[in-house]
Image (cartoon, coloured by chain):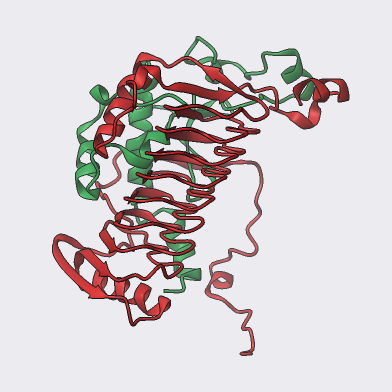
Chain colours: A red, B green
Amino acid sequence: MAELNQEHESHKLGMHTEQLSGRTQQVFFSPSAEENFTYPDGIEVDFGKSAEFDAGPMEISDINLKIRELMKSGHGTITIKNPGAKHSLGVGILNRLNLNFEGSLGYFGCGLVDGPNIRISGRVGWSCAENMMAGTVVIEKNAGSTFGAAMRGGDLVCKGDVGSRTGIDQKGGTIIIGGRAGAFTGFMMQRGRIIILGDAGKNLGDSMYDGTIFVGGKIEDLGVDAVEGEITDGEASWLEAKLALYGMKAPNGVKNLTKIVAGKQLWNYDNLEPAEKKLVL
Amino acid sequence: MANDIDHFINTDGLDSEREKTIGQHIGYRYDVNLVPDYDRITPFLKKYMETMGWADLNWLEDVHMGYEESRAAVFDRNINGWVTVPPEMELPDNQQDRDMIARELLIKFQMSADHPMVELNKAYAKF
């Protein structure tokens, strides 16, 4: 194993001696800041410039490196043929990009993405789009469990069925499921939205802190502290528009979706008296 | 949520008995479930959506103007901290317009060369 060098660039920048205090950083916005729409270190790509390659004979890391190379040469639309259900494809893309997979992905596909629009014509395995930050990921068929785990933003769409624990620890963004969702969907979600057009499995929204779940079919049962809410007019028009973006429709109209929210009895749970905890559970 | 839009600017936000006992507000200081009103979208945000190839606000739907330590502020997930809205900036009288301002300010900040992530990237980036 190579010897670890402790003298990083970060030491020179003083990042290890800085005194951290409080939760609020005293950083102020500058309303006159220049109009930039991409990260300063983002790669300049052109959606009109496209490329495709066959991933069949390639290793996982080579496929991901090839995507980066194509982006660096300005390609904004990339099509990958024969992904062969390989794991961890299309991860860590922090850029605008149109990425198409013609086939299925294995585990952890499209994780940690911030910006791209990804379309997968087949299925995906566990933890697709885990920690997704922004962009769109659309899967034409089914998805495995922990779909969109810890997701923070963007739209994640599965037109088929999804496994259990979909949206576990979700912190933002929208997950749309065309078919059924497995048990513990929305487990410990903190914010964001999940739209299930089919049926939902056991313990829906268990221990959710905040966020909203909409269900078009039957709900097997609700988890601890998940309760029914009422759809507002703003939410109804938002739902209509969001589903239309992906060519989807609520089975009996958006007004007839069942809305599930947090009962908020678990808020500040540690400070509850033992008798109060018993009541909640 | 409180009816007064400036509730968390003008008060400490400790309303319930439990909040007073523990000395901290429980829950978010703004409605995290408020969906955007697209009639109020700004030209800057429209341009941003076009650049990214999105038909709606995408991740910005979860960005709201919040209130931290009695100041209007926006949470920047990239630095895991609140960024304060300049005090001289006049705030609209409704949350939807405030949220649109918050989204604009956050994009300008995140895409600026002065953003703290630029320094961190220089120090730690692997690719």
Which residue is situated farthest in the top direction here? B3
Q: Nearer the viewer, residue A106 or A251?
A: A251
- Residue A178 image position (x, y, % from top left): 37, 39
Residue A179's image quarter?
top left
Residue at the image point whose x is 42% and y is 77% from the top: A61
Residue B65's image quarter?
top left
Is A240 placed left or right of A52 in the picture? right
Residue at the image point whose x is 49% and y is 29% from the top: A213
Residue at the image point whose x is 79% and y is 32% from the top: A270
- Residue B38 image position (x, y, % from top left): 26, 26
- Residue B25 image position (x, y, % from top left): 66, 24
In the rendered image, the quadrant that contains the C terminus of chain A is top right
- Residue A105 image position (x, y, % from top left): 40, 63
Q: How many marks?
A: 0
The answer to whether B91 is drawn above or below residue A22 in the figure is above
Q: Nearer the viewer, residue B63 or A178?
A: A178
Which residue is situated farthest in the left direction here? A48
Residue A103's image quarter?
bottom left
Q: Nearer the viewer, residue B118 or A146?
A: A146
Q: Is residue A30 visible?
A: no
Residue at the image point whose x is 27% and y is 68% from the top: A80
In the rendered image, the quadrant that contains the N terminus of chain A is bottom right
Is A248 placed left or right of A77 in the picture? right
Q: Is residue B115 visible?
A: yes
Is A232 placed left or right of A11 in the picture? left
